[in-house]
Image (spheres, helix red, strand yellow):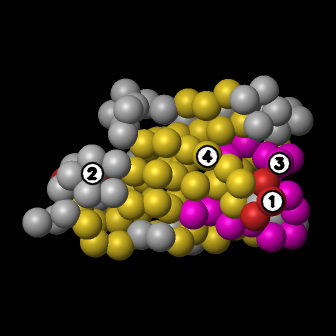
Amino acid sequence: QLQIVESGGGLVQPGGSLRLSCAASGSTLDYYVIGWFRQTPGKEREGVACIRRRDGSIYYPESVKGRFTISRDNAKNTVYLQMNDLKFEDTAVYYCAARPAWAYGCSGYDSDYDYWGQGTQVTVSS
């Protein structure tokens, strides 16, 4: 059973950077499509990045394109989300999620993912 844990959140000033980590146990992330989502109170989860190693596909919505970068380190069984030029509106709880790569591609819909971490808080504030 895949288990994933996020880390790396914190408080950062506007324009700053953070790198989130999504570490896996119980299975290798190479078998999964990995998505990063975020959620603020009263809003639905928003997909902010997705990676599928099988075909190298990567997805970003326009809201983060050029600022966020998703990458994976298979040796460490970890996926990262590098977030640069952070804005107030990036404040949210960030989640890592997984779905089987053999059957599926990247998706920005949280209902398409089977495995979730507990989330890590990112706060952008001056």
Q: Is residue 68 left or right of residue 50?
A: left
> Which label is found at residue 30?
3
| Secondary structure at numbered mark 1 | helix
Amino acid type of disc 3? Asp
> Which label is found at residue 86?
2
Q: Nearer the viewer, mark 4 or mark 3?
A: 4
Q: Quadrant of residue 53?
A: top right
Q: Report if residue 48 lies within the magenta region.
A: no
Residue bounds of the magenta highlight? 21-34
First along the sequence among labels 4 and 3: 3
Structural crowding at the residue carrying mark 1, measured as other residues with C-alpha within 10 Å and reported as few (<14), some (14–19) or many (≥20): few
Q: Which residue is mark 1?
A: 75
Evaluate if marks 4 and 1 touch, with contact meaning CB atoms under 8 Å apart.
Answer: no
First along the sequence among labels 3 and 1: 3
Question: What residue is shown at x 56% (from left), y 30% (from top)?
Answer: 59
| Secondary structure at numbered mark 4 | strand
Q: Quadrant of residue 105?
A: top right
Q: Quadrant of residue 16?
A: bottom left
Q: Nearer the viewer, mark 3 or mark 1?
A: 1
First along the sequence among labels 2 and 4: 4
First along the sequence among labels 2 and 3: 3
> Which label is found at residue 71?
4
Amino acid type of disc 2? Leu
| Secondary structure at numbered mark 3 | helix
First along the sequence among labels 1 and 2: 1
Evaluate if marks 3 and 1 touch, with contact meaning CB atoms under 8 Å apart.
Answer: no
